[in-house]
Image (tube, grey):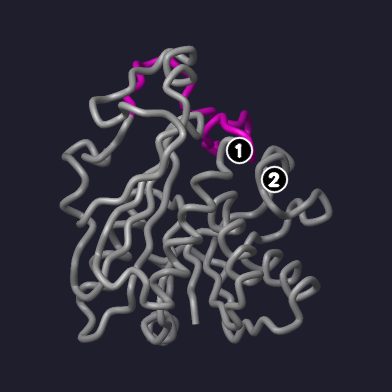
């Protein structure tokens, strides 16, 4: 069984690819609802606007993939899961953490590494404008927390963005925050993350590692950002040991 923590544009698309790849059982966690501003990036269409993302995603996937089983769906943040809920999460084979905030990532990491036999974890996120992205696979009690600096930014980030570059958009009236990238920009990161999950489930990725997508360097520059030292190629996926 695979758990998806964060059913946004990345997590939901990864879930759909895993269903197509043959994963038969999922557990979905997300407290957020789909807004009309999400529809251009999210696999769910406008018919699901206003509904909880985890609940709506399970309904949509059931229609397309009748083999899928959803024993549990939690329309809440990870931090608000009860002890029985967390026990169910701890019994899965692999957890996908997709684009949730730093507090949620840290809480999930602390809980997972406290378990006697932690499920494998794939944590994935895209950088600003979808110009780069990461998928980290961790086994055992290996923690992802040391990969973040004191300002809660990933140490392995590939781009740097000055204040005022528009890397985060705040929706008026509701306070939702999102990055200004489209579904095409996200596609390479989604495919990379789903591939790493499949490789972990089929023992083709037996040790902890990180895969990262280097998009178009010229897009970083044209949007006002700076490609960092490791961003020395365009449109490639690389893998390094964790």
- Measured as percent of width and height from the top left, residue 217 is found at 42, 22
Q: Which residue is mark 1?
A: 174
Answer above or below: position of 195 versus 93: above
Residue 87 belongs to magenta span: no
Viewer-nearest residue: 207 or 164: 207
Determine whether 38 is above or below 110 in the image.
above
Main SS category, magenta section: loop
Residue at position x 49%, y 82% from top?
A: 1
- Magenta residues? 159-184
- Residue in view at x 55 percent, y 71 percent: 28
Check the image and report above or below for 200 versus 171.
below
Residues at marks 1 and 2 touching, judged by CB atoms closer than 8 Å? yes
Expressed as whole percent of the image width and height from the top left, the position of residue 208 reads: 25, 65
Give the position of the C terminus as an image quadrant. Answer: bottom left
For residue 139, side relative to residue 52 (left or right):
left
Q: Is residue 58 left or right of residue 10?
A: right
Pointer 2 local density, CA inside 10 Å: few below 14, some 14–19, many at least 20: some
Q: Quadrant of residue 171?
A: top right
Q: Is residue 10 above or below residue 178?
A: below
Camera-nearest label, 1 or 2: 2
Image quarter for residue 214?
top left
Which tag, 1 or 2, sits closer to the chain's start? 2
The numbered dot on residue 13 is: none
The local crowd at label 1, few if under 14, some if 14 to 19, many if 20 or more residues have their Cα within 10 Å, is few
Question: Residue 143 location in percent, x, y?
Answer: 20, 63
| Viewer-proximal residue among 169 and 211 | 211
Viewer-closest of 86 and 206? 206
Q: Which residue is mark 2?
A: 35
């Amino acid at each position: 069984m695979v758990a998806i923590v964060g059913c946004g544009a990345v997590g939901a698309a990864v879930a759909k690819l895993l269903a197509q790849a043959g994963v038969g059982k999922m557990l979905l966690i997300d407290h957020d609802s789909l807004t009309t501003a999400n529809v251009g990036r999210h696999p769910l269409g406008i018919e699901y606007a206003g509904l909880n993302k985890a609940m709506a995603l399970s309904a949509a996937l059931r229609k397309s993939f009748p083999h899928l089983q959803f024993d549990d769906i939690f329309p809440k943040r990870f931090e608000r899961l009860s002890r029985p809920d967390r026990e169910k999460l701890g019994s899965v084979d692999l957890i996908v953490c997709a684009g949730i905030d730093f507090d949620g990532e840290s809480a999930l990491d602390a809980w997972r590494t406290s378990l006697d036999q932690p499920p494998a974890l794939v944590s994935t996120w895209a950088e600003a404008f979808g110009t780069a992205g990461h998928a980290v696979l961790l086994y055992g009690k290996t923690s992802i927390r040391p990969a973040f600096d004191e300002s809660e930014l990933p140490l392995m980030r590939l781009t740097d963005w000055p204040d005022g570059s528009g890397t985060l958009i705040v929706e008026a009236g509701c306070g939702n925050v999102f990055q200004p990238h489209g579904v095409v920009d996200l596609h390479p990161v989604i495919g990379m993350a789903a591939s790493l999950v499949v490789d972990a489930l089929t023992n083709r990725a037996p040790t902890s590692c990180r895969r990262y997508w280097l998009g178009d360097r010229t897009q970083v520059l044209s949007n006002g950002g700076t490609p960092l030292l490791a961003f020395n190629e365009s449109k490639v996926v690389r893998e390094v040991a964790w």
